[in-house]
DNA sequence: CTAAAATGTTACCGACCGGTAACATTGGGG
DNA sequence: CCCCAATGTTACCGGTCGGTAACATTTTAG
């Protein structure tokens, strides 16, 4: 349908829609729908519409739905890695502080989530093909994250870093799916509590050993 | 295509295929494919074929794919509840023993899983509609399970049962998704270790308090 | 053996989906 | 003002999927 009103002096249609670049807008809309309705539960047409554009334009930015999915996952992962860098910058040389702040940030995210679970977790469940590029991105991220936690536990002087790191990771991962039956708030609080507790216990143990050697 | 060989004395076609009732066979085949390829990733035709039957017969037993999904989930949940009864029977009046055996059974299941995650967890991620009957079944099950763990923690004399129960549940849930990057074996072992540790710590604390009162 | 119940076969429907082609429109930069 | 690039519009293709109808066949019970 052609509009015969020739845009007299007003803002152009493009600038009316949004100042955000199209590609980013598509990614945001896609992520929103993927998370709310599931990756397989939403079609590219709906994504384009939500991004205030159309399917054709979407396919000019992304070669396929799978690529769109992968780019979305990449964005989430990049954001998380950024978060880790920030964590490291704010608690330089303080591995315990990083772990504790990490639990607090996760708790905050949990509180803001409510209902539908973790985006990455769901995406993982929805992409059974182990060769899907998005799956590889997620797996690599998980591995990096786990290694980072192990390193932090080692630096914090935990006697069995692999063990402690697995506890941390298990609880962090589990908090997302567990919150659906307990409530995200309480889960978040308990998550923070237990991390604080583990860190504190470790500090006391280290002081005790120190005292034993010096006394 | 009609077979003109009139089945002379040999086993009939039905008995050749399987002695397992058709409905159960369909459910097993469906569960297998659901778990391996994702609920939305498998069609009813493939399920029927895997069950050595056809779509029409499948629809004589299940009104829709959603009902098939729901029945499958119901089966898993029923099996888990059965497991809890067995746990209670084998460790009657021993809440710590139940928690410990629970972690051991979970570790065993983890070891046998390898690669694709928890069936219920994946199903939850794949059914975004909060009104889906299967989702309700899962949620109710999760709630019952969590209450049971709280009750056990209370019976075991944990000072903050809600807190401890949340820890147990978080780790149990998290172990499934975490294992993809660490390896299910190690996760299972550490899961067992930490539950044993928590139970043992609690016992020591109780003994200490007991000693304080009597001494 | 026969009738009825269960199961199989085939063909089909409508809806949706991922993806593409061809063409129209709009917008900004020279 | 005009051209070129970006974006929009429409229509379409092939495939898959959930679900059903009509009819053939087999199995079981009496």
Image (cartoon, coloured by chain):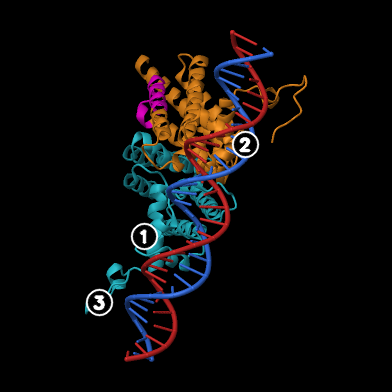
Chain colours: A cyan, B orange, C blue, D red
Q: Position of residue A30 (x, y in %)?
A: 41, 57
Q: Is residue B73 visible?
A: yes
**Residue B34 location, x and y as percent?**
54, 38
Locate residue A200: give its quadrant.
Answer: top left
Task: Indicate the secondary structure of the residue bearing disc 2.
Answer: helix
Mark 3 and mark 1 in contact (Cβ < 8 Å)?
A: no
Q: Which image quadrant: the N terminus of chain B?
A: top right
- Whether residue B170 appears in magenta in the rendering, the answer is no
Dot 1: chain letter: A
Disc 1 and disc 3: Cα gap in Å? 23 Å
Please give the name of the residue rendered at 36% of the width and 49% of the height, measured from the top-left corner.
Answer: A105
Question: Which of pointers 1 and 2 indicates the residue nearer the eye?
Answer: 2
Real-space Cα distance between discs 1 and 2? 38 Å
* Chain under callout 2: B
Q: Quadrant of residue B158?
A: top left
Earlier residue among tags 1 and 3: 3
Residue, disc 2: B49
**Tags 1 and 2 on a common chain:** no
Q: Quick check: B157 above or below A164?
A: above
What segment carries the magenta color? Answer: B144-163
Q: Is residue A154 left or right of residue B147?
A: right
Foreground residue, B208 or B50?
Answer: B50
Name the residue tied to disc 1.
Answer: A49
Q: Secondary structure at mark 1?
A: helix
* Chain ID of residue with mark 3: A
Q: Residue placed at 44% from the left, 24% from the top? A: B204
Crowd class of label 2 (few under 14; some 14 to 19; many from 20; radius 10 Å): some
As drawn, the label of residue A7 is 3
Asked whether the residues under the numbered discs 3 and 2 touch, taking CB atoms below 8 Å apart as contact, a structural biologist would say: no
Crowd class of label 3 (few under 14; some 14 to 19; many from 20; radius 10 Å): few
Looking at the image, can residue B52 be seen? no
């Amino acid at each position: 349908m052609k509009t015969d009103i020739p845009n007299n002096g007003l803002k152009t249609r493009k600038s009316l829609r949004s100042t955000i670049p199209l590609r980013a807008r598509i990614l945001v809309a896609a992520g929103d729908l993927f998370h709310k309705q599931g990756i397989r539960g939403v079609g590219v047409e709906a994504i384009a519409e939500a991004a205030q554009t159309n399917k054709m334009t979407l396919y000019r930015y992304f070669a396929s739905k799978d690529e769109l999915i992968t780019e979305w996952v990449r964005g989430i992962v990049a954001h998380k890695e950024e978060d880790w860098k920030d964590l490291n910058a704010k608690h330089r040389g303080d591995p315990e502080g990083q772990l504790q702040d990490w639990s607090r940030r996760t708790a905050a995210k949990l509180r803001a989530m409510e209902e539908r679970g973790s985006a990455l977790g769901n995406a993982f469940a929805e992409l059974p093909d182990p060769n899907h590029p998005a799956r590889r991105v997620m797996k690599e991220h998980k591995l990096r994250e786990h290694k980072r936690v192990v390193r932090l536990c080692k630096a914090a002087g935990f006697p069995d870093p692999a063990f402690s790191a697995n506890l941390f990771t298990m609880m962090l991962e589990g908090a997302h799916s567990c919150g659906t039956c307990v409530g995200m708030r309480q889960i978040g609080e308990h998550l923070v509590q237990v991390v604080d507790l583990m860190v504190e216990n470790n500090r006391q143990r280290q002081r005790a050993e120190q005292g034993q050697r010096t006394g």
